[in-house]
Amino acid sequence: MFAFCSKYTHGNYIFISTTYNRDPDPFEIFSFNFATSNNDDEEDNSNTPINIQIRGYKTDADEVWKSTGLTLWRASDYLCQYQMDNLHLFRNKHILEIGAGLGLNGILAWRASSSNSEVCITDGDSDALVHLRDNVDRNRNTNSEDGNDDSNVGKVSCKQLIWGKDTSEKFLSTIAKDQTYDVILASDIIYSPVIVEPLWETIQTLLKKPTGVFVMAYARRKVPVSIELVCEKGEEAGFVHEMVKEDKEEGIWVYTFRYKV
């Protein structure tokens, strides 16, 4: 956004007028290329690079202040790295992304999946869902000549999910058809203490017992809630956690949460 200031006087008063011009093109295309290995012999396309394009607002666009889900944040990159380093956790699985925003992590889980996988990418914000669905369509591949067409990957869907016990139970019965998820993904979702309890109610309701895993990437920000509080509430909800990826300099961590045995 650009600002222009002008000054004028009237009697003994000085007035300063500021005119703001919006960025005429607040959108940006974020491009990603993920190299895969051929360690998983059952995957025909396991060594085919995964190219993803995400369309969203620039981080300094006005619209980002209205909904934080309209741009990409730092922790999503680290969760992508963890996904690519641990593809065995995501193949042939029933996967849910919560608080997906533009959907990078869920789209990667889908594009890296096997034909037996199902990925549901969700957000609670209606505006974010419009962009999320656009990004899923943007990354559909119908070109069978490059070996990376959609016949080799699982099913994908985009749905609205508002966190909490009642809403998650409704989602489970109407959307998930009473099938809980092997893996739940999330990144950059912690911004206020009020979301912590509904978050764990959602995980308790939708994560498969006893084998499911919740993978969350967290970036340190100036917000009134800490990762320590999130982990503490997770323990109270019946989960144990493990830090599986760390960048102290950037202040970003990836945690896994599993049901207590």
Image: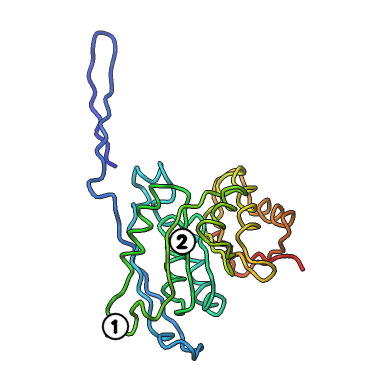
Percent x, y for residue 59? Answer: 38, 51
Q: Is residue 217 left or right of residue 31?
A: right
Spatial CA span between label 2 and label 1: 24 Å
Q: In which quadrant of the rendered view does residue 245 lie?
A: bottom right
Q: Is residue 97 left or right of residue 202?
A: left
| The C terminus lies in quadrant | bottom right
At 35% from the left and 76% from the top, the residue drawn is 150
Q: Is 72 rendered above or below residue 39?
A: above
Say which of 235 and 229 sits in front. Answer: 235
Three-letter code for the amino acid on which mark 2 is drawn? Ile
Label 1 CA crowd tier, 10 Å (few <14, some 14–19, many 20+): few
Label 2 element class: strand
Percent x, y for residue 144? Answer: 29, 83
Q: Is residue 25 left or right of residue 127?
A: left
Say which of 33 and 112 sits in front. Answer: 112
Disc on res. 144:
1
Q: Is 209 rendered above or below residue 86?
A: above
Q: In which quadrant of the rendered view does residue 63 lie?
A: top left
Colour mode of the rendering: rainbow
At 65% from the left and 53% from the top, the residue drawn is 230
> Which residue is at the far bottom?
41
| The N terminus lies in quadrant | top left
Disc on res. 121:
2
At 32% from the left and 59% from the top, the residue drawn is 134
Percent x, y for residue 214? Answer: 61, 64
> Which residue is at the far right?
261
Q: Is 75 rendered above or below residue 57?
A: below
Label 2 CA crowd tier, 10 Å (few <14, some 14–19, many 20+): many
Label 1 element class: helix
Three-letter code for the amino acid on which mark 1 is drawn? Ser
At 45% from the left and 56% from the top, the residue drawn is 159
